[in-house]
Image: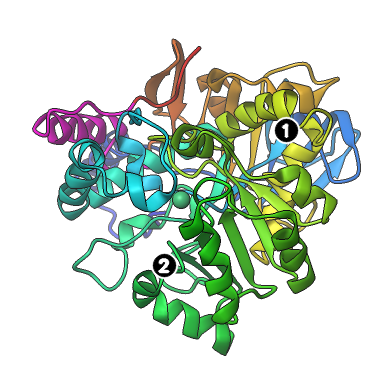
Amino acid sequence: MIVLARPSFHNGEKMQRLLRILLALFLLAPPALAADGPFLINGAIVTPGRVIQNGWITLQGGKISAISETRPTAAGARTLVTRDIVFPGFIDLHNHPLYGVFPRWHPPKVYPNRYEWRADAGYWQAIQTPEGKLVATRFCDMDAYVEMKALMGGTTSLLGIYRPADTDAVPPCVAGLVRNLDWATGFHGDGVGHERAGNVLGVRPNDLKLSEETLAQIKRGPIDLIAVHLGEGQRNDPDSRAEFARLKDLKLLTPNTAIIHGVALSEADFGEIKAAGASFIWSPRSNFELYGETADIAAAARQRVTMALAPDWSPTGSTNMLAEIVYAKGVIDRQFKGLVSPQQLFEMATSIPARIARIDDKAGSLKPGLAADLFLLRGDASKPFDALVTARPEDVTLTVIDGVPLFGTSDHMSALGVTALETVNLCGQARAINPHAIADGFADITARLTGALRSENLTLAGLAECN
Ligand SMILES: [Zn+2]
């Protein structure tokens, strides 16, 4: 926000020149964003206790200030009237978002475990080698592109951006757009480096060298959550099974531990996870594409394990949380009939990961006092959870983070006072990006990434997988 001092001189000609300069500056710069609100949004409001049909949610100062059945009186409020469903933003606890610039990788076979495909020359050629080059040269462009893909699918908090190899922290450009649970959420202070969640790739001794600091922090206290890839392989794969024993040897099966994948885990293992107060993050699509099977979530449910859902990454998982929910619904219908309801899938993507990450007092539900992190979905508002699990990418009509409308239809964005929009095509429909969200412009970022990938004989991944 620029605050202009009142001009102190009275010469008419000088004043006219100043006014012309100010007008030119105003026309050149996008209008300032009224992020403080108040904003009133009308629709079917999905609160923790019930869905308020034709309800109202008021956003002010980056927070949800009220939820009501009747239209509130709020002087000067920007008002958006819709028939859409208003959901809290998704909290994605398992992703490798930077890989979201790459097209899908189609594994030539199923693998017994993660170590095998990660050693596959074809994988290195298609993904890992170009990824290393791109992170070193185009980190901020990659970050902006993949975070836009996440929030286009309703994600408002995300874990898993990692730093370039030659730096100690991620570049400051990671702040903004989606909240980065490991680097910059805004929940624990401004800027990068105050966060309370850590991400560890594996529990082999070699992998642990990469994460000694994170492990030390969880023991000392400044880390609330450690998310560990574990048992990522087929059910009877010995390497994958050995990882759970290794985790226990390290005394890292704790209430602050979230186990990612766990395809190789047995029901007894899930019982131990429950007893330790640890939690579990399910990523079915990537499991099926790489290993031909997924975790035994029926066993996890029998053991009453706290379970969240997340997409892993887009090369073999889903593009974003919304797409993974739709995929998970198909897996449940095929393999775990009746085990998880559409409403429970919604909770596995919002309130449950918020509890796992110890941010449920800040985000994950639509409640007064929590962050104004939400998205709107077009669909049958009388069956909001069914609409969610059958949603198409283009059904998301607005995403708001910290009270700022970042993405949506131009109608919705304009109603909330965001103008000078940058337009993108999402599955054949025009969508608008808040021009303040990405200083460089999304089209320029897309063009630079397209060029960088072309020089590796690759194409830039699309914004979504369209039907
Ligand atoms: Zn992963």
Mark 2 vs ligand 1: CB below 8 Å: no
The kind of residue tagged 2 is Gly
Vertically, is 166 above or below 366? Answer: below
Q: Position of residue 211 (x, y in %)?
A: 40, 74
**Where, quadrant-wise, is the N terminus in this rendering?**
bottom left
Mark 1 vs ligand 1: CB below 8 Å: no
Numbered circle sitting on residue 86: 1
Vertically, is 448 above or below 330? Answer: below
Residue 460: in magenta span:
yes
Q: Position of residue 430 (x, y in %)?
A: 45, 15
Helix, strand or loop under label 1: strand
Count of labels shown? 2
Foreground pick, 120 / 370: 120
Numbered circle sitting on residue 191: 2
Q: Position of residue 185 (x, y in %)?
A: 52, 61
Q: Residue at x 66, y 28 (%)?
A: 331
Numbered circle sitting on residue 378: none
Vertically, is 167 above or below 421? Answer: below
Helix, strand or loop under label 2: loop
Q: Which residues are magenta?
A: 438-461
Q: Judge the density around disc 1: few (<14), some (14-19), many (≥20) Cα neighbours within 10 Å.
A: many
Q: Residue at x 78, y 28 (%)?
A: 385
The kind of residue tagged 1 is Val
Residue 16 quadrant: top left
